[in-house]
Image: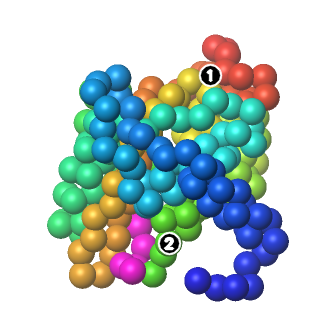
């Protein structure tokens, strides 16, 4: 791990470490208690919730059913060396973020930070007009993470000989056309 990280990243990682150590994260999906989250799952959840807290939004809960769905899709993508969204997302009413990188080269927090880096292009507006670049795809991962109505997340990773594929699933799905996305003002229908 590089020691020449910017102070903001170092502070963020220190806060995440404290949060993860202070309260063990337990999976929650309305069913019987699940196993405690492993350290990678805790990091993924903490990264999501750190950003949501920054925006004044409630934290996401870990949902093992979403994580299971994410694992199935991540394994399918890795096995086929493919990279595209699941065609079933509308039917199953889940949102999805995808990440791919060279196997064994990235830490869990770096994967989610890839999504969060899109905040530099985000601007409040009526979805899909929420990007300073004019292309909502430049902020789509980020807007799913900060979508005010989203309550749960589950992520999983799979690898092949070359790449790792991370899939995060969200409920309810974000990035809904025609809704004003302004986390400070919350979500409103056009």
- At 29% from the left edge and 25% from the top edge, which residue is drawn? 31
Q: Which secondary structure type mostly characterizes the magenta part of the structure?
A: strand
In the rendered image, which quarter is residue 9 located in?
Answer: bottom right
Which residue matches tag 1? 179
Q: Position of residue 20 (x, y in %)?
A: 56, 53
Which part of the image, by quadrant, shows the C terminus? top right
In the rendered image, which quarter is residue 164 located in?
Answer: bottom left
Residue 82 lies, with reference to residue 57, above or below; the image says below
- At 25% from the left edge and 44% from the top edge, which residue is drawn? 68
In the rendered image, which quarter is residue 98 located in?
Answer: bottom left
Q: Magenta residues?
A: 98-104
Q: Position of residue 172 (x, y in %)?
A: 45, 26
182 or 21: nearer the eye? 21
Residue 77 lies, with reference to residue 85, above or below; the image says below
How far apart are the two marked residues, 1 and 2, measured between alpha carbons? 34 Å
Q: Is residue 92 toward the left or the right of residue 189 in the image?
A: left
Residue 150 lies, with reference to residue 166, above or below; the image says above
- At 35% from the left edge and 23% from the top edge, which residue is drawn? 30
User: Element type at marker 2?
Assistant: loop
Q: Which mark is residue 107?
A: 2
């Amino acid at each position: 791990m590089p020691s020449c990280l910017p102070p903001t990243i170092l502070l963020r990682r220190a806060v995440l470490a404290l949060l993860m150590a202070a309260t063990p994260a337990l999976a929650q999906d309305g069913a019987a208690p699940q196993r405690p989250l492993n350290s990678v799952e805790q990091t993924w959840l903490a990264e999501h919730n750190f950003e949501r807290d920054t925006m004044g939004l409630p934290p996401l809960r870990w949902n093992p059913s979403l994580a299971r769905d994410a694992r199935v899709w991540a394994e399918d993508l890795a096995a086929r060396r493919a990279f595209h969204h699941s065609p079933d997302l509308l039917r199953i009413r889940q949102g999805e973020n995808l990440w791919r990188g060279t196997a064994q080269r990235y830490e869990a927090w770096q994967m989610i930070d890839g999504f969060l880096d899109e905040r530099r292009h985000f601007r409040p507006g009526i979805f899909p007009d929420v990007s300073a670049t004019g292309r909502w795809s430049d902020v789509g991962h980020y807007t799913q993470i900060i979508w005010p109505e989203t309550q749960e997340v589950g992520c999983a990773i799979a690898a092949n000989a070359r790449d790792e594929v991370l899939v995060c699933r969200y409920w309810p799905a974000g990035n809904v056309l025609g809704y004003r996305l302004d986390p400070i003002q919350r979500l409103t229908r056009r």
